[in-house]
Image (cartoon, grey):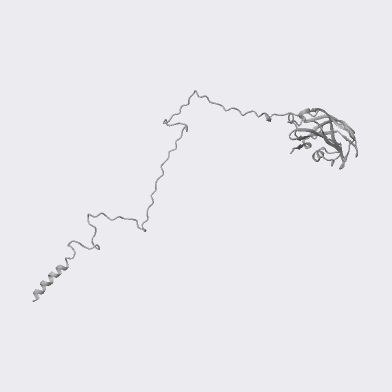
Amino acid sequence: MPTLRLRLVLPLALFACTDRPLGETDGSTAGPSTGDSPPATGTTPDTATTPTTTAAPSTTATTGDPTATDGSSTTEIDPSVATTTPDPLPKLDFFLPGPTSGLMGCTLDAPAGTMVSGSSSIGPFMAQRAYFGVVDFDSNLFSPRIMLVSPTADPEVALELQNSSSGPIYYGDIHTDSFWESGWIGNWPIDANHYADGLTGVIARPDGAVIEAQAGNWVMHDPADPPRLVGSLQGEIAGPFDAVYCDKLDISVISE
């Protein structure tokens, strides 16, 4: 009987060992076969990656004539084509001096030749210095204005303020034609008064002014020879005058 039991146990043991084909093992101990391709490898977070540095292309400085070419392209200049020079700027004739371009500035040194005297309702008056300005009506030289300054008055103050605060003056307008019609030459009525100590002296009428000539440089500004009007006054205050131009007496009138 013991012998029979041993024979039955041996086949059972052999059957239990044949669940897997012989020669195969589980994945825990077996390595890859020689015919399998190796698994892909990646970078784990703990693995540092060395950056790749690309060197810049080297440049070679070239010295020499910058206008030289390498011969790949050639530009030929046709000698028959003439080089043109641009025309000069046109002449602007309106910048040329005109008949009254010298009417600018104010000369305080009045020339000799003025000897005016007389009286008005406020007393006697005498002057040896005369100045004139221009009434400009719509850019047209319309008529002259005249100021005679007494010996006790300051010409600079009188011309600037146009009053008698520095001393007696004779001041008013000569009613002429336009300068372009007569040049102001002729015998004209005058509207002027004698001013002294803040008072206005009325001059007996009729009175007038005779403009005999233009003197000085009227065409261009010349401080050494400024424009002048030469003539005389007639009436209660009378005598010859040689009036020099002063732009402080100018008045510009624009019609609406």
Determine the image quadrant of residue 132: top right
Q: Does the image show residue 225?
A: no
- Establish if 61 lies above or below 214: below
Residue farthest to the top, as pictured: 80
x then y, percent, for residue 177: 79, 30
- Which residue is found at the position 9% from the left and 76% from the top? 2
Determine the image quadrant of residue 195: top right
User: In the visual, does 11 lie left or right of 41?
Assistant: left
Q: Quick one: 121 or 54, which is closer to the camera?
A: 121
Q: Quick one: 126 or 94, which is closer to the camera?
A: 94
x then y, percent, for residue 194: 87, 38
- Which residue is found at the position 13% from the left and 72% from the top? 9
x then y, percent, for residue 89: 61, 29
Q: Quick one: 114 or 147, which is closer to the camera?
A: 147
Q: Quick one: 238 or 131, which is closer to the camera?
A: 238
Determine the image quadrant of residue 223: top right
Residue farthest to the front, as pictured: 256
Q: Does the image show residue 173?
A: yes
Counting labels gives 0
